[in-house]
Amino acid sequence: MADTNLAWLPATELAALIRRKKVSPVEVVDAVLDRIARINPRLNAFVTLTAEQARRDAKAAERALGKRGARLGPLHGVPFSVKDLVITRGVRTTFGTPLYRDNVPAEDAPMVERLKAAGGIMLGKTNTPTFGWIGATHNLVFGITRNPWNLERTPGGSSGGASAAAAAGLGPLHVGTDGGGSIRIPASCAGVFGHKPSYGRIPTYPVSGAWSLSHIGPLTRTVADAALVMTVCAGPDERDQYSLPAPAVDYVKALRGSLKGLRVAYTDDLGFADAVDPEVRAVCAKAARTFRELGCRLDEVKPGWPSPREFWGEIFCGGIATRMAPYVDRRNEIEPGLRRIIETTLKNGPTKYVQAWFDRLAWWQHPRALFEKYDLLLTPTIACPPFPVGLDNPTEIAGTPVEPYAWIPFTYPFNMTGQPAASVPCGFTRDGLPIGLQIVGRRFDDVLVLRASAAFERARPWAQHRPAVD
């Protein structure tokens, strides 16, 4: 088996091959690290590599395979990466800012701890914008991360290092976070799968700037790999008092169920999308019709919801501004766009933030009513294809000028509701740029979102599409 093939193999297959001693953890880690050494200089997906430790861990994993009665975790010998917003014990975590350039945490975040406990081998940290403030990936510490499908385009953000790594075959499992779309946006931009679990399903610690909005979850090339991560990582942790009780569910086995008879809604505007690229609209509408073939009752709906952008922005930007407030005088270490947000937000009276919370809680009635009738909601993941690198946001969509964050009208609403939502690759633009379809489920129903994603993947496989970065 060629080394490049090992780097592309899903975690589910790698784990089985390692367990049966068909391949060794050392071979797997070497194959992925070799590929990173070759491909990463063009992408800048990984920003801190822990290659020596990964090789040591791989040798230990290999020794364990030779021991009689050794208890092997479900990810034994399988490599993974961690977004640089997520703390890692003994490994630099910069949060994408020079202000934390030399920050070395003393503990692992719960998700990292659980991936390691399951036998996973950490390869290093992937790039992110400062505290995940935008849906593109560049910062003043490490620079720009590029999309493997087109090096002049963004891989999305804020988990853009993770999505670029997943798309380019730099290992099977990648940890992302999502406070307004930061798992689903890059999954869409890079043509991979991203699952934002229900709020609290995988514990978050320490709290991020967007503490009440931020979810942590997997970016992978297959749905089964994301389900495997969910099985390993879901469940409460005392460090996160909002973490959910663990249902007795094997997410991988749960993928097998049928979707027959489910009520599914599709919309491409939600009532407040300022503009949606016509190609995105057409590709997503066609992809949504796949659910009819899967036995669902599909309705195209016009929910007519009022826009929650103002109060989402108040909570999201308010959190980041509060986190950055002590450093506001270090102007040359904060991006101009982020500095504007911080300075504007810090002028707001405290009741504005509280009012945003009231508005958020009241807005829940709109999705609540829709999900009384429908099991799933489908939308485009984002309103446009991946835009040029270096921009914080696109300035226009299909010729219509748009404000910052106006291109993500489909993602941030479901951070405020805490609902599970995934992005599945569903096609390409004429220029060969990936497009994602978002699948949103009822509160706490991660199983159905993953099952629907797996059914779509079987009907419209995407893994055979690989970017030409070799």
Image (cartoon, rainbow, N blue to C red):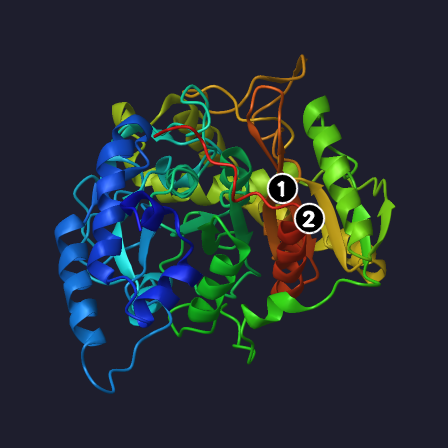
What residue is at 51 percent from the left and 52 percent from the top? Answer: 222
Q: Is residue 59 above or below residue 290?
A: below
Q: Amino acid at mark 2?
A: Asp
Q: Report how far apart the C-alphas of labels 2 and 1 lie in the structure.
A: 7 Å
Task: Say which mark, if any, is on residue 371.
Answer: none
Residue 455, located in which quarter of the rendered image? bottom right
| Residue 272: % across, % down | 75, 33
Residue highlighted by disc 2: 359
Disc 2 is placed on an element classified as helix
Query: In the displayed image of the protein, which residue is found farthest to the bottom?
Result: 69
| Residue 174: % across, % down | 39, 51
What residue is at 28 percent from the left and 27 percent from the top? Answer: 140
- Residue 180 visible within the image: no
Q: Is residue 449 above or below residue 428?
A: below
Screen quadrant of the C terminus: top left
- Residue 441 visible within the image: yes
What residue is at 49 percent from the left and 52 percent from the top? Answer: 214
Query: In the displayed image of the protein, which residue is found farthest to the front?
Result: 1
Residue highlighted by disc 1: 311
Q: Amino acid at mark 1?
A: Phe
Viewer-proximal residue among 132 and 453: 453
| Residue 134: % across, % down | 47, 33
Badge count:
2
Viewer-proximal residue among 333 and 201: 201
162 left or right, relative to 313? left
Marks 2/1 in contact by CB < 8 Å: the verdict is: yes
33 left or right, relative to 193? left
